Image: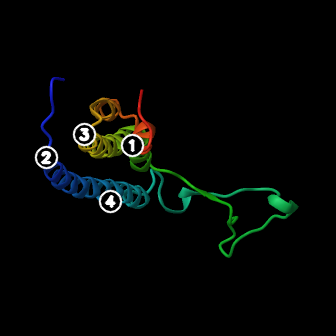
């Protein structure tokens, strides 16, 4: 890198904009997960009516044979339908992607802020290190604003 020409006020404005979009993304992901959970609960099961409950027979915890008002054990498990299972599998497989999105947003913001701060202080090597840490999503290095990434 031969030279830099950074306008800290411009960076600050962009960080505010990106921060607002990152917050929107976080809210959207939270809504998505809540909606998936609600959809899974509402999807029902692959078996009709009362067959969805699997009663437990014999003694349960404590050695008693507890039965609820319907004659079914209160520890009966509800069957999971194929739609709920598919939604759960989707959320599980996308969990790392969602975390990666959040980590990358955080790394970009922290890296830009740290690099700009170091630039203002005249430490171009530390600014370059902050950029590299942001590029490789090294959040721990970026969160330590006092030390230098080497």
Q: Is 107 in front, or is 115? A: 115
Label whose residue precedes the other's in the sequence (4 or 2): 2
Q: Which residue position holds label 1? A: 99
Q: In which quarter of the image is the C terminus?
A: top left
Q: Where is residue 71 in the image (x, y as percent from the top left)?
A: 69, 70
Q: Which residue position holds label 4? A: 31
Q: Which residue position holds label 2? A: 7
Give the residue at x 16% y 51%: 14
Residue at the right extreme? 63
Marks 4 and 1, Cα distance to the nearest angstrom? 15 Å
Give the residue at x 30% y 59%: 27
Q: Is 41 in front, or is 118? A: 118
10 Å crowding of disc 4: few (<14), some (14-19), many (20+): few
Q: Residue 40 carries which label?
A: none
Marks 1 and 3, Cα distance to the nearest angstrom? 30 Å
User: Mark 4 or 3, which is nearer the eye?
Assistant: 3
């Amino acid at each position: 890198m031969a030279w830099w020409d950074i306008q800290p006020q411009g960076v600050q404005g962009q960080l505010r904009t990106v921060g607002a979009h990152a917050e929107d993304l976080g809210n959207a992901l939270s809504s998505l997960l809540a909606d998936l959970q609600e959809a899974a609960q509402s999807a029902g099961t692959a078996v009709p009516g009362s067959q969805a409950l699997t009663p437990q027979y014999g003694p349960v915890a404590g050695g008693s044979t507890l039965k609820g008002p319907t004659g079914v054990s209160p520890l009966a498990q509800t069957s999971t339908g194929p739609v709920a299972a598919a939604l759960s599998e989707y959320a599980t497989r996308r969990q790392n992607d969602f975390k990666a999105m959040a980590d990358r947003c955080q790394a970009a913001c922290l890296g830009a802020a740290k690099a700009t701060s170091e630039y203002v202080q005249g430490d171009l090597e530390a600014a370059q290190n902050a950029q590299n840490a942001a590029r490789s999503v090294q959040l721990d290095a970026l969160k330590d604003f006092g030390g230098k990434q080497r």
